[in-house]
Amino acid sequence: MSQRADPVEDTDRSRPHAGGAAILGRLPYLGLLGMAGVFVAVMLGFEEPNTAILLVSGLLMLIAPLAAAVHLTLTSEMTREEKRLWVRIFSSHRAFGALSPYLTSLDRGATARRITAQDSK
């Protein structure tokens, strides 16, 4: 017979949590909604676009990159070297392609190493 281990309370704050990744992972969709809003505001704003819709849509477009920057600055789940890898990735030509993996990954350090390994090939 196998014995089950007693559940241990998770007190390690440095480990990524699925709840935070789920919230961050939904932010690119708000960016897409913002892009659609800008398109609609420009195309349907006959002589001049609706300022309120244009402003809200523009802010929605910036949510995902701003959330990634704030998270990268404030998080304690990555080491300094992993954060530097992400800064290097976000300042390269792969910035927008790396935004979604950053926001949805449960292990951002491993994801950064994988992306930089792909760049070096």
Image (spheres, grey):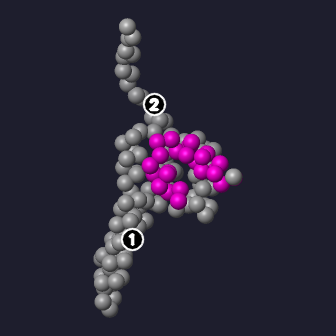
Specify the amino acid type for callout 1: Met
Q: In the displayed structure, would residue 91 be above or below residue 11?
A: below
Q: Residue furthest top?
A: 1
Q: On the rendered structure, is 3 left or right of 116?
A: left
For the point 39% across and 57% down, the residue is 27
Could one spot residue 66 in this view of the protein? yes
Residue 21, image x and y in percent?
41, 46
Q: Which mark is residue 35?
A: 1
Task: Answer with left or right where residue 40 lies relative to residue 78.
Answer: left
Residue located at (47% from left, 35% from top)? 15
Q: Are marks 1 and 2 in contact (CB under 8 Å)?
A: no
The x, y position of residue 121, in whole percent, is 69, 52
Element at label 1: helix
Q: Is residue 70 visible?
A: no
Q: Residue at x 39, y 22 (%)?
A: 8
Residue 52 part of the magenta-drawn span: no
Segment tinted magenta in the rendering:
97-120
The residue type indicated by label 2 comes to Asp
85 up-or-down from 29: above or below: above
Picture quadrant of residue 35 = bottom left
Please give the name of the residue rendered at 61% of the width and 64% of the height, measured from the top-left corner.
93
Q: Residues within 10 Å of mark 2 (few under 14, many from 20)?
A: few
Q: Quadrant of the N terminus?
A: top left
- How crowded pointer 1 is (Cα within 10 Å; few <14, some 14-19, many 20+) is rated as some
Residue at numbered disc 2: 12
3D distance between C-alphas at marks 1 and 2: 38 Å
Seen from the viewer's position, the closer of residues 32 and 66 is 32
Q: State the image quarter where residue 89 is shown.
A: bottom right
Hey, which residue is sitting farthest right in the picture?
120
- Measured along the vertical axis of the image, is residue 94 above or below residue 72? below
Please identify the dominant SS of the magenta region: helix
